[in-house]
Image (cartoon, rainbow, N blue to C red):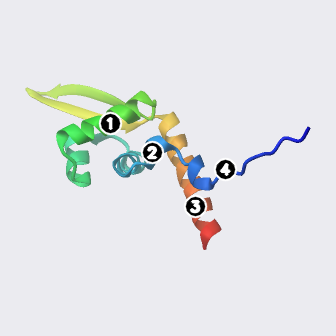
């Protein structure tokens, strides 16, 4: 009995959590810049509060980012940072994307 193995296209191997445009931008900023405030992410990515929050929750639920809330005086400050798992997932995503791009050129 032979087992037929289906070839998986490289794009199917890309992390779907990171692959979405806004989440890719968030991860790129966090991996490249360390800790970043909510307002800086919002401004840099051109997202609304609600849209950014939704994408941050997906990344947080996946264990790719962590959130720290604090107050500076009376002003709230929320910062995000990529976790080790998130950094590894982002690097793997970039490696797979590069493999895909090389395969089509």
Please tell me whether residue 50 is drawn above or below residue 102 in the rendered image.
above
Please tell me whether residue 65 is drawn above or below residue 47 in the rendered image.
above
What separation in Å lies between label 2 and label 1 (alpha carbons)?
11 Å
Q: In the drawing, what numbered circle is on residue 100?
A: none
Please tell me whether residue 81 is drawn above or below residue 95 in the rendered image.
above
Q: Is residue 79 left or right of residue 6?
A: left
Q: Are marks 2 and 1 in contact (CB under 8 Å)?
A: no
Q: Nearer the viewer, residue 44 or 8?
A: 8
Q: Which residue reaches farthest bottom?
A: 105
What separation in Å lies between label 3 and label 2 (alpha carbons)?
15 Å
- Characterize the local packing of mark 2: few (<14), some (14-19) or many (20 or more) Cα atoms within 10 angstroms: many
Q: In the drawing, what numbered circle is on residue 98?
A: 3
Q: Which residue is mark 2?
A: 18
Q: Are marks 4 and 3 in contact (CB under 8 Å)?
A: no
Q: Which residue is mark 1?
A: 56
Query: Residue 55: where, in percent of width, then height?
Result: 32, 39
């Amino acid at each position: 009995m032979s087992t037929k193995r289906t070839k998986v296209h490289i794009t199917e191997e890309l992390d779907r959590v990171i692959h979405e445009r806004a989440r890719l931008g968030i991860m790129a900023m966090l991996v490249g810049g360390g800790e970043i405030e909510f307002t800086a992410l919002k401004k840099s990515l051109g997202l609304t509060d609600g849209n950014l929050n939704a994408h941050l929750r997906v990344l947080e639920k996946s264990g790719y980012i962590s959130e720290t809330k604090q107050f500076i005086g009376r002003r709230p400050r929320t910062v995000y940072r990529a976790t080790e798992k998130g950094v590894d997932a982002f690097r793997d995503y970039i490696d797979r994307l590069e493999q895909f791009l090389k395969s089509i050129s």
